[in-house]
Amino acid sequence: MFNKVLIANRGEIALRVIRACKELGIKTLAVYSEADVDSLHVQLADQAVCIGPAASSQSYLKIDRIISAAEIGNVDAIHPGYGFLSENAHFAEVCASCNIKFIGPPPSAIRSMGDKNIARATARAAGVPVTPGSEGLVETETEALRIAREIGFPVMIKAVAGGGGRGMRPAHNDGSLVAGFHSARMEAEKCFGNSGVYIEKLIENPHHIEFQIMADSHGNVVHIGERDCSMQRRNQKIIEECPSPLLTEDLRKRMGEASVRLAESVKYEGAGTIEYLVDNAGNFFFMEMNTRIQVEHCITEEAYGIDLVKEQIKVAAGEPLSHYVRDAKRRYHAIECRINAEDPANNFAPCPGKINLYYAPGGRGVRIDSHAYTGYTVPPHYDSMIGKVIAMGTSRENAIARMRRALGEYILQGIKTTIPFQQAIMHDPDFVRGEYDTGFVAKLIDARNSEFGKKRL
């Protein structure tokens, strides 16, 4: 097992990894930007090193500074979390060249699946259905227009790197395609250091279903069920649940088998997530694979009674999959709400600032993953998520009831958050019936705009 792990990330995921390491008896080194000096992960790690200014391009995306911190701290492994460098094959190679274990898949698997364009070709070869799209990177707007017209509008322009809804733009005509092509490239370059994009057919208002994969270096590959991530605003997830209310047992079986087959084809190791679009007829299409831990891994943990982050670390250390992961059986229903520092009454505008009072809900069946606390200042430089509420129950109805209670107990004074909007969703009749798709949130916003408008100051 590792002696010391550097966490190349920030916020709640850095704190999540620190906690997993502590339970495994591993020392931790936090890296942080100047804007994150007061972040909780910096306070709770065994050691912390500042790696640069607030901008992620000058701190969390600077490989040389992270490696320098690793050498200062004499670590033997690096956990990348999600986002930033978590799907950067070059970073994994640099770690290996410095005799530091990258807690994630090998660089070859990251390149095969982390690059979404290559991943589509890999999925085709493994017999997994994919949506129609470009065969390679799209370099110019002229080429983008040609491909979009061949496929037929609407289409989606997507960054080959990263995730979290970044670098994605829908296009319904020539004008929106040209504008979206350039804005997607710029956002992808800013967020991931890679401006490459591809184009695929846009399936309007599908269901977004992802399967959790875990694999070791001994040839064991399993899937640990699915998560429904259809509750999205502008391609960014706001609520997830496990299992999906959409899937039948037959569809779950077929999608699970396809996910394992695809992971095996690239000799995958570690935690990964294979994402699909599913239409109302039950047809599923491979969308992408995230070669890292997901934000929403928590609901799989709570539904199945496992620890995916600790399993990641143990697998990276050469251990085979734990029997409780190989033979995992779902026991509960779990729902997650991502709490963002945004104002839903003002078009979800970011609301950084100081939290004057912080009180997290508790009680049976409620889990909070957050780096926030009373007096913490949410910086304006990064993603607006400040925490996650996970509610679990023996049934979906029980999990929804607990989430309603938990959201009602959550106190965050000094900034605006998405909690009121998520409370509305938890009481929406269509959501309660499990009848929703990726277009649900946009429709709900349109329906409630006048009500939210009344709350504006």
Image: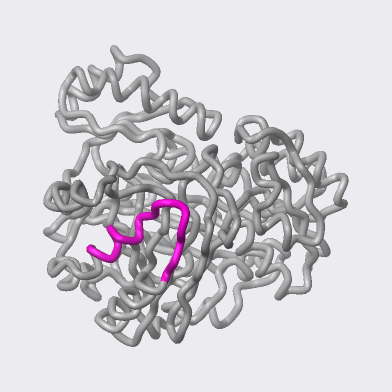
Above or below, 160 against 186 in this view is: below
As rendered, which of 55 and 254 lies closer to the eye? 55
Above or below, 112 against 174 in this view is: below
Q: Is residue 313 magenta?
A: no
As rendered, which of 289 and 442 lies closer to the eye? 442
Q: Which residues are magenta?
A: 410-424
Q: Is residue 130 visible?
A: no
Left or right relative to 383: residue 310:
right
Which quadrant of the figure has residue 152?
top left
Q: Is residue 221 visible?
A: yes
Q: Residue at x 44, y 66 (%)?
A: 411
Q: Is residue 413 magenta?
A: yes
Instruction: Tell me how the rendering is colored.
Output: one colour
Left or right relative to 58: residue 369:
left
Which quadrant of the figure has residue 63?
top right
As drawn, the residue found furthest toward the top would be 142
Q: Residue at x 41, y 42 (%)?
A: 350
Above or below, 93 against 320 in this view is: above
Left or right relative to 345: residue 226:
right
As rendered, which of 328 and 180 lies closer to the eye? 180
Residue 210: x percent and y percent? 36, 59
Above or below, 48 against 193 in this view is: below
Q: Residue at x 38, y 67 (%)?
A: 336
Q: How many marks?
A: 0
Q: Quadrant of the C terminus?
A: top left
